[in-house]
Amino acid sequence: MSKLKMSCLWGAASGTAILCALATIGTAHASGFQVRETSGTLQGSSFAGMSTLTTDASTMSYNPGSVGQYTETTYSAGVTVIRPVAKATNTVATDGARTTIAQTGGGYKDMAEDAAVPNAHAVWKLNEQINLGVSITAPWGLVTDNDSDFAGRFFGTTSKIKTVNIKPVMAYRFDNGLSIGAGPQIQRFEARLDKAVPSLAGAKTEGNSSLKGDDIGYGWTAGLNWELTDATRLGLSYNSEVDHKLEGKIKFDSAAKGLLTPYTDRNASAKITTPEAIAFGMSHDIDDQWTIMGDVQWTNWNSVSELVFNYDGLINSNLSTSGSTTEYYNWGSSWFGALGARYQHDENWAFTGGIAYDETPIKTRNRNVRLPDSDRYWVSFGTTYKVADWVDVNLGYTHIFAKSARVDHTSAALGNYAADYDAKVDIIALQANFKF
């Protein structure tokens, strides 16, 4: 191996360690709180081809069955910058029995935060039929933040979900072109949920709470990738649910602790399950230059029904039921579908494009201020440049158009809050791929 290749290999290994650390810094959501951005290569096709393509190691993240199709050891590392915008308009809020939030008309600044989402993938060729792969991604995430004077603050202000998911995969390729792969998922999940809390007696005053917790959970993944002919491939994959028991604390600011009915910091725990997903896709080489791809994915968000926080004591001694609190979500399943094409212009340049439909799992009656999610449409473009026989670079861009989303909270104690949310997202992904 040349000194240049060796330097790039060591740089790639160092980059993986850095990416693992960065993956805990910040993420953003697709539909639900899913982060689809795991590959700069697939970004350019709206993730059409996620079940079938094996152009570089980053395409293995959605289908472990693809790992067996790689013909040489390969490494991929990248970062995706996500710039979402979500603004509330037509706001109407009325006071509750314990709150003062009255507002008619107007709106609020962008509640969504930008994020950089890293990823790293590697496939090692063990022998002619067996490959080992590892994928490191941040598949679930959410960052929304509202001002302290936000009229819906008693239903939620800051919301953050951060994850790191590691998938080691072993894959076997049969002589008929069928590759099957499977392995565990090791997932770290961290959540923070803030909101305002009212005084339970006396004047209508308030404070703030911050609830944090984290956990490491385990699941599994399996899939197949089948070269039916030299030109046509099928892909099928499954990613299991991952159960988490979050352990952490709920803390209150000095205002909440100084109320006539003061709040008390407590240890907290909660159970949450990230959803299972099934993906199916097909790709076909029309000729030496053109490839068309199509994929669908079903995600079972029914696992996100309610979030019950249990405390090691009452958080407010004036409320006998404050040993636990519940946030209701009642999400359903959702579909994602993508169509795309890849054009190999010459030996150095390739171009991709794609469109997608991303269905929200949240019905209007269940939508809340933490995540005013709606159906969305993707348009993407991408390019690949081969720097050398053993390294290439991918750049992908996506613009997401989201439908307007209505949020409507009603509470006799906390008041009523309603608003329309308009959102859009711009995504830029950069990926570097190495073959050894």
Image (spheres, helix red, strand yellow):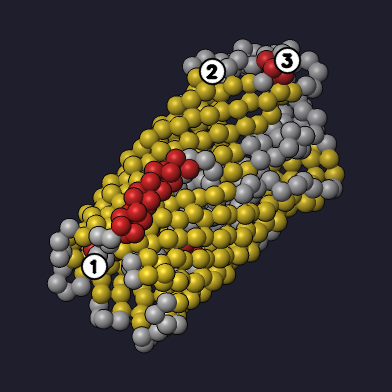
Residue shown at 61% from the left, 12% from the top: 317
Residues under numbered marks 2 and 3 in contact, where contact means CB atoms less than 8 Å apart: no
Mark pair 2, 3: CA separation: 17 Å
Residues under numbered marks 1 and 2 in contact, where contact means CB atoms less than 8 Å apart: no
Residue shown at 48% from the left, 76% from the top: 351
Sequence order check, earlier mark of 1 and 3: 1
Looking at the rendered structure, the secondary structure element under dot 1 is: loop
Residue closer to the observer: 22 or 226: 22
Sequence order check, earlier mark of 1 and 2: 1
Mark pair 1, 2: CA separation: 54 Å
Residue shown at 38% from the left, 51% from the top: 11
Residue closer to the observer: 353 or 281: 353
Q: Is residue 246 left or right of residue 64?
A: right
Image coordinates of residue 277 in percent, x first then y, are 39, 55
Residue shown at 64% from the left, 16% from the top: 263
Residue for badge 2: 266
Looking at the rendered structure, the secondary structure element under dot 2 is: strand
| Residue 167 in the image: above or below residue 95 | below
The amino acid type of the residue labelled 2 equals Arg
Q: Is residue 388 left or right of residue 160?
A: left
Residue for badge 3: 259
Residue closer to the observer: 39 or 84: 39
| Residue 323 in the image: above or below residue 174 | above
Determine crowd level at label 2: few under 14, some 14-19, many 20+ residues with C-alpha closer than 10 A: some
Residue 71, which numbered label?
1
Residue closer to the observer: 311 or 29: 29
Is residue 63 visible in the rendered image? The answer is no
Image coordinates of residue 34 in percent, x first then y, are 49, 51
Q: Quadrant of the N terminus?
A: bottom left
The amino acid type of the residue labelled 1 equals Thr
Mark pair 1, 3: CA separation: 66 Å
